[in-house]
Image (spheres, rainbow, N blue to C red):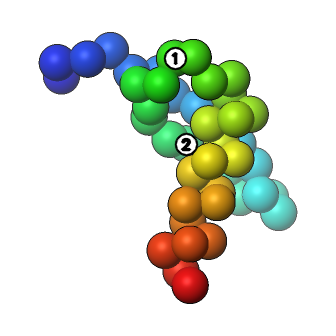
Amino acid sequence: MDKPVRLVGYNVEGAEYFVATDRRYLSAEQGATIYKLRWIIESF
């Protein structure tokens, strides 16, 4: 990879999800929230 990434994990109703992100200025909670909102938008 060209950029280092970090792995953010979160749990929704007992299911674990992990997202790799290069956005280091976001907290883990912010990164998880953005991904969850993105998923809702794409599902719409």
Instruction: List x then y, in percent, for residue 21.
Output: 44, 31
- Let me know if residue 9 appears in the view: no
Q: Separation of disc 2 and disc 1 at Cα?
A: 15 Å
- Residue at the (62%, 48%) spot, across then down: 34
**Residue placed most toward the observer, 8 or 15:** 8
Where, quadrant-wise, is the N terminus in this rendering?
top left
| Residue type for callout 1 | Arg
User: Looking at the image, which residue is at 32% across and 15% down?
Assistant: 4
Callout in the foreground (2, 1): 1
Residue 34 against residue 12 in the figure, above or below: above
Q: Judge from the rendering whether residue 30 lies leftward or rightward of residue 13; answer left or right.
A: left
**Residue at numbered disc 2:** 18
Q: Is mark 1 on a helix, strand or loop?
A: loop
The residue located at (49%, 74%) in the rendering is 42
The part of the image, by quadrant, that contains residue 10 is top right
Residue under label 1, please give it.
24
Three-letter amino acid code at disc 2? Phe
The local secondary structure at tag 2 comes to strand
Looking at the picture, tell me which residue is in the foreground, 16 or 39.
39
- Whether residue 18 is visible here, answered yes or no, is yes
- Indicate the position of residue 6 as horizontal and vertical percent values: 47, 21
Label 1 environment density (alpha carbons within 10 Å; few <14, some 14–19, many ≥20): few
- Judge whether 1 appears above or below 12 on screen: above
